[in-house]
Image (cartoon, helix red, strand yellow):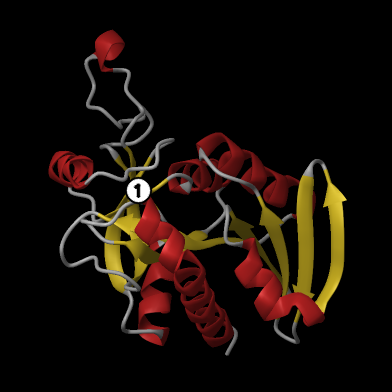
Amino acid sequence: MKTIGMIVAVEIQSVLKRYGAKLVKRKETAGYQVLEYETDQYRMVIVNCGLGEIAAASGTQFLISEYHVDIVINFGVVGGLTEEMSKTKVCIVEKVVHYDFDTSAADHTEVGRYSQYPDIFLPTTKVLSDTARKIHPELVPVVCASGDKFIAEPEQKIRVHEMFGADICEMEAAGIVLTCNRNQVPCMLVKCVSDGIEGGFEEFQETMDAAADLCLEVVEKIVAGMGR
């Protein structure tokens, strides 16, 4: 039986609503709320990591080191950076750019570039993304801009899109993907847009729960399809 690690930043209520009665274990360990859910096909270990890149990287490493997960899945809500990325659109992340990682003053490399990668983009696991799109063809493949900042203003969203070619933005993906790639653990990121290019924190608050519920529903469909 495969063990799937699910890392969640702020969308834990969607998990509790969907799996609450089916959870086989709930515990606090190493400062994390850890939930476990099992089917005939897989065991899922869910960690509520909290906001931001460092929290996400730490939570991902915890799943890998303590539970020896075979796959890491992250689902969550994001901001749209283009007109096409409107509310409730569900996306599969193919590449991530850590847009506020900047060593250019020291080494003259591009903003967002880690030296061990050939360019600014951190890839997710292609075979998982391709499989997810076969199972759920409505998924939109995207580039995700990730950084420790909530981007609310339309001008900021446009600037990040123009600088990095990103379609969506959020605050955990870079930490998750970097950690998974370093550990050679496959990862898949499924996101749902909560606030469009003109939206900000108010729109995020209004739509977050519904967007997170929809996103988790799609993830469950993908995971079930992978086990067939």
Q: Look at 25% across and 68% down and name the residue there.
A: 86
**Disc 1: CA contacts within 10 A as few (<14), some (14-19) or many (>=20):** many
204 in relation to 113, above or below: below
In the figure, is residue 39 to the left or right of 212? right
Q: Position of residue 89 (x, y in %)?
A: 32, 73
Q: 30 above or below 140? A: above
| Residue 37 or residue 65, whichever sits in front | 37
User: Which of the 4 image quarters holds residue 124?
Assistant: bottom left
Q: Could you tell me residue 182's position as x and y percent?
A: 53, 40
Q: Is residue 78 visible?
A: no
Q: Look at 42% across and 68% down and name the residue there.
A: 207
Q: Nearer the viewer, residue 13 or 128?
A: 13
In depth, the one of 39 and 18 nearer the eye is 18
Q: Is residue 42 above or below residue 84?
A: below
Q: What kind of residue is marked 1?
A: Val
Q: Which residue is mark 1?
A: 96
Looking at the image, which is closer to me, 56 or 71? Answer: 56
The answer, for residue 28, to whether it is visible in the render is yes
* Residue that protrudes farthest toward the left in the picture: 162
- Residue at image position (50%, 41%) is 175
Quarter of the figure that contains the C terminus: bottom right
Where is residue 14? Give x, y as percent.
61, 71
Q: Residue at x 52, y 85 (%)?
A: 221
Q: Residue furthest bottom?
A: 228
- Residue 36, given in percent of the width and then of the height, sits at 78, 68
Quarter of the image holding residue 164?
top left
Q: Is 69 on the left or on the right of 157, as rendered?
A: right
Horizontal side of 152 relative to 42 (left or right) equals left
Residue, far top: 106
